[in-house]
Protein backbone atom coordinates (compact mmCIF):
# COMPACT_ATOMS: atom_id res chain seq x y z
CA UNK A 1 0.00 0.00 0.00
CA UNK A 2 1.53 3.36 -0.97
CA UNK A 3 2.41 5.84 1.79
CA UNK A 4 2.55 9.60 1.70
CA UNK A 5 5.71 11.22 3.04
CA UNK A 6 5.13 14.38 5.02
CA UNK A 7 7.20 16.90 7.03
CA UNK A 8 6.38 16.54 10.74
CA UNK A 9 7.36 18.04 14.09
CA UNK A 10 10.29 16.59 16.07
CA UNK A 11 7.86 15.52 18.80
CA UNK A 12 6.01 13.27 16.33
CA UNK A 13 9.26 11.48 15.49
CA UNK A 14 10.19 11.26 19.18
CA UNK A 15 6.88 9.61 20.03
CA UNK A 16 7.46 7.08 17.24
CA UNK A 17 11.01 6.45 18.45
CA UNK A 18 9.88 5.82 22.02
CA UNK A 19 7.70 2.98 20.76
CA UNK A 20 9.92 1.55 18.04
CA UNK A 21 13.59 2.43 18.47
CA UNK A 22 14.51 -0.48 20.72
CA UNK A 23 13.38 -3.04 18.16
CA UNK A 24 14.99 -1.11 15.29
CA UNK A 25 18.38 -0.92 17.05
CA UNK A 26 18.27 -4.61 17.88
CA UNK A 27 17.59 -5.39 14.24
CA UNK A 28 20.30 -2.97 13.09
CA UNK A 29 23.12 -4.18 15.36
CA UNK A 30 21.90 -7.76 15.87
CA UNK A 31 22.11 -7.50 19.66
CA UNK A 32 20.13 -5.73 22.38
CA UNK A 33 21.27 -2.14 22.41
CA UNK A 34 20.82 0.41 25.16
CA UNK A 35 21.38 3.71 23.35
CA UNK A 36 22.37 6.42 25.76
CA UNK A 37 23.80 9.71 24.52
CA UNK A 38 25.66 12.17 26.67
CA UNK A 39 27.30 15.50 25.99
CA UNK A 40 30.24 16.77 28.00
CA UNK A 41 31.59 20.31 27.89
CA UNK A 42 35.01 21.57 28.92
CA UNK A 43 36.53 25.02 29.26
CA UNK A 44 40.13 26.16 29.44
CA UNK A 45 40.15 28.88 32.07
CA UNK A 46 42.56 31.66 32.83
CA UNK A 47 41.15 32.86 36.11
CA UNK A 48 37.54 33.53 35.23
CA UNK A 49 38.24 34.00 31.54
CA UNK A 50 37.32 31.21 29.17
CA UNK A 51 40.15 30.97 26.63
CA UNK A 52 38.98 27.76 24.98
CA UNK A 53 36.27 25.14 24.95
CA UNK A 54 35.73 21.54 23.91
CA UNK A 55 32.55 19.53 23.54
CA UNK A 56 32.25 15.80 23.10
CA UNK A 57 29.25 13.59 22.46
CA UNK A 58 29.37 10.06 23.79
CA UNK A 59 27.22 7.29 22.38
CA UNK A 60 27.72 3.60 21.67
CA UNK A 61 31.11 3.64 23.44
CA UNK A 62 32.43 6.26 21.04
CA UNK A 63 33.34 9.79 22.01
CA UNK A 64 33.02 12.26 19.18
CA UNK A 65 34.80 15.60 19.42
CA UNK A 66 32.18 18.10 18.28
CA UNK A 67 34.18 21.26 18.96
CA UNK A 68 37.61 22.34 20.15
CA UNK A 69 38.23 26.06 19.98
CA UNK A 70 40.99 28.12 21.56
CA UNK A 71 40.97 31.92 21.31
CA UNK A 72 43.37 33.16 18.61
CA UNK A 73 45.58 35.02 21.09
CA UNK A 74 45.90 31.93 23.28
CA UNK A 75 46.82 29.32 20.66
CA UNK A 76 49.99 27.20 20.53
CA UNK A 77 50.31 27.21 24.32
CA UNK A 78 48.88 23.76 25.04
CA UNK A 79 45.25 24.62 25.80
CA UNK A 80 43.84 22.64 22.86
CA UNK A 81 45.81 19.53 23.79
CA UNK A 82 44.78 19.88 27.46
CA UNK A 83 41.12 20.14 26.45
CA UNK A 84 41.39 16.97 24.36
CA UNK A 85 43.26 15.16 27.13
CA UNK A 86 40.58 16.03 29.69
CA UNK A 87 37.85 15.00 27.23
CA UNK A 88 39.65 11.65 26.72
CA UNK A 89 39.81 11.08 30.49
CA UNK A 90 36.05 11.56 30.73
CA UNK A 91 35.45 9.37 27.68
CA UNK A 92 37.62 6.69 29.24
CA UNK A 93 35.67 6.93 32.48
CA UNK A 94 32.49 6.21 30.49
CA UNK A 95 34.16 3.17 28.89
CA UNK A 96 34.66 4.66 25.46
CA UNK A 97 37.23 2.77 23.44
CA UNK A 98 37.73 5.49 20.86
CA UNK A 99 37.64 9.23 20.23
CA UNK A 100 36.70 10.54 16.80
CA UNK A 101 36.69 13.89 15.02
CA UNK A 102 35.98 15.17 11.53
CA UNK A 103 38.10 17.97 10.10
CA UNK A 104 38.90 19.35 6.65
CA UNK A 105 41.44 17.08 4.95
CA UNK A 106 45.06 18.25 5.33
CA UNK A 107 43.98 21.30 7.33
CA UNK A 108 45.78 22.80 10.30
CA UNK A 109 43.09 21.20 12.48
CA UNK A 110 44.15 17.80 11.12
CA UNK A 111 47.79 18.62 11.97
CA UNK A 112 46.72 19.64 15.48
CA UNK A 113 44.85 16.35 15.96
CA UNK A 114 47.81 14.37 14.62
CA UNK A 115 50.11 16.12 17.11
CA UNK A 116 47.61 15.07 19.78
CA UNK A 117 47.86 11.40 18.79
CA UNK A 118 44.93 11.10 16.37
CA UNK A 119 45.29 9.12 13.15
CA UNK A 120 43.57 9.58 9.82
CA UNK A 121 41.04 6.79 9.45
CA UNK A 122 39.37 7.71 6.21
CA UNK A 123 38.91 10.59 3.83
CA UNK A 124 35.35 11.41 2.88
CA UNK A 125 35.33 13.02 -0.54
CA UNK A 126 33.36 16.22 -1.11
CA UNK A 127 31.76 16.16 2.32
CA UNK A 128 31.20 19.23 4.53
CA UNK A 129 30.83 22.32 2.32
CA UNK A 130 31.76 19.93 -0.51
CA UNK A 131 35.31 19.74 0.88
CA UNK A 132 37.20 16.51 1.49
CA UNK A 133 36.99 15.66 5.18
CA UNK A 134 39.37 13.53 7.25
CA UNK A 135 37.78 11.16 9.76
CA UNK A 136 40.28 11.12 12.62
CA UNK A 137 40.48 8.73 15.55
CA UNK A 138 42.37 7.93 18.69
CA UNK A 139 41.96 4.60 20.45
CA UNK A 140 41.76 4.92 24.22
CA UNK A 141 42.14 1.34 25.42
C1 LIG B 1 43.16 23.83 16.51
C2 LIG B 1 43.20 24.57 17.86
C3 LIG B 1 42.06 24.09 18.76
C4 LIG B 1 44.55 24.23 18.52
O1 LIG B 1 44.57 24.77 19.83
P1 LIG B 1 45.97 25.14 20.54
O2 LIG B 1 45.69 25.47 21.95
O3 LIG B 1 46.69 26.14 19.73
O4 LIG B 1 46.75 23.74 20.44
P2 LIG B 1 48.00 23.29 21.33
O5 LIG B 1 48.82 24.49 21.69
O6 LIG B 1 47.49 22.46 22.47
O7 LIG B 1 48.81 22.40 20.31
C5 LIG B 1 48.92 20.98 20.43
C6 LIG B 1 49.85 20.50 19.32
O8 LIG B 1 49.24 20.77 18.05
C7 LIG B 1 50.09 21.60 17.26
N1 LIG B 1 49.26 22.58 16.57
C8 LIG B 1 48.37 23.41 17.11
N2 LIG B 1 47.81 24.20 16.17
C9 LIG B 1 48.40 23.84 15.01
C10 LIG B 1 48.25 24.30 13.68
N3 LIG B 1 47.41 25.30 13.36
N4 LIG B 1 49.00 23.73 12.71
C11 LIG B 1 49.87 22.73 13.02
N5 LIG B 1 50.04 22.24 14.26
C12 LIG B 1 49.32 22.81 15.26
C13 LIG B 1 50.98 22.30 18.26
O9 LIG B 1 52.20 22.71 17.66
C14 LIG B 1 51.17 21.23 19.30
O10 LIG B 1 52.12 20.28 18.85
P3 LIG B 1 53.41 19.89 19.74
O11 LIG B 1 52.98 19.96 21.18
O12 LIG B 1 53.73 18.51 19.30
O13 LIG B 1 54.42 20.92 19.39
C15 LIG B 1 43.11 26.11 17.64
O14 LIG B 1 44.07 26.50 16.72
C16 LIG B 1 41.74 26.56 17.17
O15 LIG B 1 40.87 26.89 17.97
N6 LIG B 1 41.56 26.60 15.83
C17 LIG B 1 40.26 27.02 15.24
C18 LIG B 1 39.20 25.94 15.40
C19 LIG B 1 39.70 24.55 15.01
O16 LIG B 1 40.30 24.36 13.97
N7 LIG B 1 39.40 23.55 15.85
C20 LIG B 1 39.92 22.20 15.71
C21 LIG B 1 38.86 21.21 15.46
S1 LIG B 1 39.52 19.59 15.76
Image: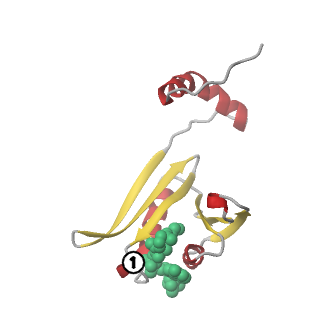
Q: Is residue 134 left or right of residue 83?
A: right
Q: Eyeballing the image, is 73 above or below 135?
A: below
Visual colour scheme:
secondary structure
**Ligand 1 within 8 A of label 1's CB?**
yes
Furthest-right residue in this view:
1
Q: Position of residue 82 (x, y in %)?
A: 42, 73
> For this rendering, which residue is in front, 3 or 11?
3
Q: Position of residue 10 (x, y in %)?
A: 50, 30
Total marks placed = 1
Q: SS of the residue at dot 1?
A: helix
Q: Relative to the observer, which residue lies in front, 57 or 61?
A: 57
- For the point 61% across and 28% down, the residue is 22
- Quarter of the rendering containing residue 44: bottom left
Q: Residue at x 57, y 50 (%)?
A: 61
Determine the residue located farthest toward the left in the rendered image.
Answer: 48
Q: Split into 4 quadrants, where in the image is the N terminus?
A: top right
Q: Residue furthest bottom?
A: 76
Around disc 1, counting alpha carbons within 10 Å, would you say few (fewer than 14), some (14 to 19), or many (20 or more)? few
Query: Is residue 72 among the parts visible in the rendering?
Result: yes
Q: Residue at x 22, y 73 (%)?
A: 47
User: Is residue 81 visible in this depiction of the protein?
Assistant: no
Tell me where residue 113 appears, x and y as whole percent.
Answer: 56, 73
Is residue 107 toward the left or the right of residue 91 in the image? right
The residue at 56%/77% (across/down) is 108
Q: In the figure, 22 relative to 127: above or below?
A: above
- Quarter of the image where one finds residue 116: bottom right
Q: Is residue 48 left or right of residue 73?
A: left
Q: Quadrant where the C terminus lies?
A: bottom right
Residue under label 1: 72
Amino acid sequence: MPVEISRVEARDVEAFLRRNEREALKTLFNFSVVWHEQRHDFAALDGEDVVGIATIRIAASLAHVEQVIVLPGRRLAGAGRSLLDRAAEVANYYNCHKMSAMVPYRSSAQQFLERCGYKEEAVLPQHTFKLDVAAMRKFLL
